[in-house]
Image (cartoon, helix red, strand yellow):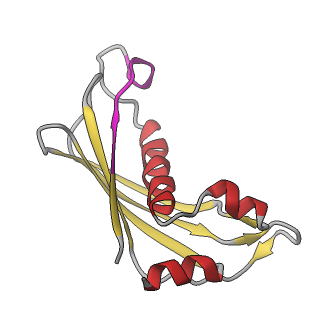
Amino acid sequence: MKKHSTTLRVRYAETDQMGVVYHGNYAQYFEIGRTEWLRSMGVTYKYMEKTGIMLPVISLICNFKKSALYDDVLTVTTQLRKTPSVKIEFEYEITNQNQELICTGSTILAFINKEINKPTRCPKYILEKLEL
């Protein structure tokens, strides 16, 4: 399935007093990974919301392998797990500038019709882009 990588630098505010990234920030790193994955296909959250689709996270798993530190350059590699239906599933791998594995994880998000606040199928415009 389609894979995309993006890099980011760990900011001081994302760390504790020991300079280690606080575990809660990994959910944000995953979000950056998936929004850039979508953007690489020409789709943005802003466009989805404009067309009546919301995409809340319904499951989040994070497996820590090594600490990320202040000023590390992290690469977030995001991969689609399978063709989306009512849900879309992503897998993540985060490595540092030395190619050391920092963490792995996954998220499941649900497509929600904004107007009726109910689950809906993946929009056709996303499925079409996955076929290219």
Left or right side of 23 for 86: right
| Relative image position of residue 119 (x, y in whole percent) | 73, 76
- Residue at the spot 60% in from the left edge and 58% down from the top edge: 44
Q: Give the residues in magenta.
A: 6-16
Q: Nearer the viewer, residue 11 or 59?
A: 11
Q: Specify whether residue 132 is painted magenta.
A: no
Q: Nearer the viewer, residue 27 or 32?
A: 32
- Residue at the spot 65% in from the left edge and 79% down from the top edge: 123
Give the quadrant of residue 25.
Answer: top left
Tell me if I can see residue 86 in this picture. Answer: no
Left or right side of 62 for 39: right
Left or right side of 76 for 65: left
- Residue at the spot 47% in from the left edge and 71% down from the top edge: 89
Q: Nearer the viewer, residue 40 or 15?
A: 40
Count of residue discs: 0
Pick the quarter of the image with the N terminus.
bottom left
- Furthest residue in direction right, as rendered: 116
| Relative image position of residue 108 (x, y in whole percent) | 52, 67
- Asked if 25 appears above or below 123 in the picture, the reply is above
| Relative image position of residue 110 (x, y in whole percent) | 63, 70
Tell me if I can see residue 101 in this picture. Answer: yes
- Furthest residue in direction top, as rendered: 17
- Asked if 3 appears above or below 72 in the picture, the reply is below
| Relative image position of residue 76 (x, y in whole percent) | 33, 49
- Residue at the spot 77% in from the left edge and 60% down from the top edge: 50
- Asked if 15 appears above or below 52 in the picture, the reply is above
- Asked if 94 appears above or below 58 in the picture, the reply is above
Pick the quarter of the image with the C terminus.
bottom left
